[in-house]
Image (cartoon, rainbow, N blue to C red):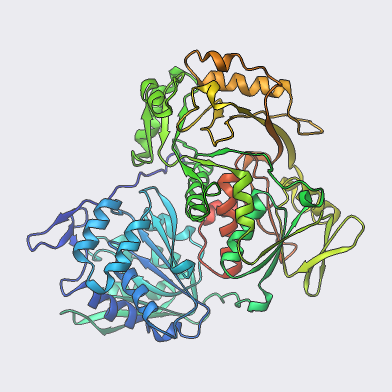
Amino acid sequence: MSSSYVPLIPAAVEFDAQGRLYSPVYGDVYHSPSGALGQADHVFLRGNGLPERWRGRGAFTVCETGFGLGLNFLALWRAWRDDPQRSRTLHVVSLEAQPFGRPDLAALLARYAPEPLAQLAGQLAAQWPPLLPGLHRLEFDGGAVTLTLGFGDAQVLAPRLSARVDAYFLDGFAPERNPQMWQAPLLKALARLAAPGATLATWACTGELRRALQEAGFEARRAPGYGGKWHMTVASAAPGAAAAAPAMADDARHAVVVGAGLAGAGIAQSLALRGWRVTVLDAGLAQGVAAHAGHTAAALTPVLARDDNARARLSRAGSARAQARWAALGPGAAPTVCGTVQLERDEGRAAALAGTLATLAFPRDWVREVNRDEASVLAGLPLARGGVFFGQGMLVQPDRLIPALLATPGVRVVPGKVAQVAADVAGWRVLDAAGAELTRAGTVVLANAFGARGVLEASRLLEPLPRVAQMHALAGEVTLIPAAALGGGPRCVVGGEGYLLPDTGAGCVAGSTYVHGATQADIGAEGQRITLDKAAGLLGGALPKFEALAPGSLPGWAGWRAVLPGRLPAVGELPHAPGLWLAAGYASRGLSWSALMGDLIAARLCGEPSPLENDLAQLIFPR
């Protein structure tokens, strides 16, 4: 991976002599001189038999190469909205190597989007993601319309997509200007995603393209073109395309989620938002203690890696999903985007950090280097060193977030400690320690952290999962410091060796300890000494009231982490137990994985395009 990282290059806004939007990289204009809306309608919609083909369908999925300004997407969305017989949901996956930044996109859409699309264009611009490589999931019309944007080289991204595509829009720059977008390797990667009966359309029309489509498994032919072009190309997937998974009947859309912490609550919300009935079994509730009760604050900050490795890509995707999924929750439950100053471990690493940021070329408003003085100004407290500032770093209150997620309509929380599961003809029976049935469903998700290992072992399902068998529990505690002892506390999250969080009204949380071999997760003087020392290490100046704090005298919270080798979670359907899913091993990044893994599981169950690239999904697959 280290040698293959290629930074994302934003599109430049340039115009040709006729005033048309023009790409200097490819020497070509962005859309038909006869009008983008007319081209979208004639070539891409009618060329794919739309809107007729989506009628009466539960879901319809389109894959596009070359997003540009998104005018094809907007025209498609409008046609779907205007059709009373439309499919229940519309999913679009679109690849773009050189996306426009949000201010440029908004200005260009204001200029080029015709009036019928103006309101939708405004919604697109408002949700436009930062220019970071990978997949970005946008949702419109209450989640009925999804747009999965792949930023990066289509040749790299297409093999990493997971979707069942009903229609393809091929809309890259002209074949003679950008030949790789029209050649067999990319077309084969896209054809792998074709659902039975899939169709394809493009304005391009050459014999070479038709031969490449044939080689990729499409049956291609010429059709009348648009706007002065004699011909365009339409195609259909050759018989034998991979069969789509049958749609699940509405009455079967019931899932049992075992565990009511960050993992379980994230899955419950994602499924309920898609119309599922969800029964959450909460072992803590059975003992009268809600998960994360008293866990007043935690941080959600992405990870950086010079080679943009899997952990960094996953954490970036997780942060974005959490922000999108949780932003509409009520006050206190929704994350506060306050930014994170992440301090370097020592002054000597500054040069390496600068090199990492230069290599990644991420947008400065997403991450930038800060010296000690800038870091201290951002935090509003004297800090020990400089580092990086993540503009999207978030403060989250788990004890308010989790109840809000579990309050999603369609979710029912019941007390119950699960000991094992047993397959039967209708799916899975969920049993307690006495063997009594707690509930049953066709879909069961074990999201009960370290407890999942015991359930799998008792159910004789652990043996094929050697990595999961190595899961262990790690105790840890955080300390609540009075904000007055920290001059009001930091204005943003401060991280590094430990972390210090802004005041939530209850105080400032400092963390965290890692206790191997603990039999209980407790608050104590030793743990508080460690967390206070970590906080002191982040702070660069004397704060007399802080230094006077006595370890053991402060409130706090203690809990458990479920940790797997490699510190990445295990998420997916168990191959040897169809209908039984695992979502465990979230380690110290429960907030990073909660919404993303919920959407990953829900997308699989609902036949949506995956919000996560295949190589990352395979890395976390239970094994």
Who is closer to the viewer here, 93 or 239?
Answer: 93
Residue 402 shown left or right of residue 319 in the figure: right
Please determine whether, in this image, residue 619 is positioned above or below residue 495.
Answer: below
Please determine whether, in this image, residue 174 is positioned above or below residue 538.
Answer: below
Work out which residue is located at the far right of the displayed protein and give it: 434
Viewer can see residue 206? no
| Residue 121 spot, x, y in % from top left | 30, 65
| Residue 178 spot, x, y in % from top left | 26, 60
Residue 51 shown left or right of residue 551 in the figure: left
Viewer can see residue 332? yes
| Residue 544 spot, x, y in % from top left | 54, 13
Location of residue 618 by image quarter: bottom right
Residue 451 shown left or right of residue 484 in the figure: right
Please determine whether, in this image, residue 310 is positioned above or below residue 29.
Answer: above
Work out which residue is located at the far left of the displayed protein and give it: 17
Residue at 48% across / 57% down in the picture? Answer: 160
| Residue 139 spot, x, y in % from top left | 44, 63
Query: How many dots with numbers?
Result: 0
Location of residue 372 by image quarter: top left
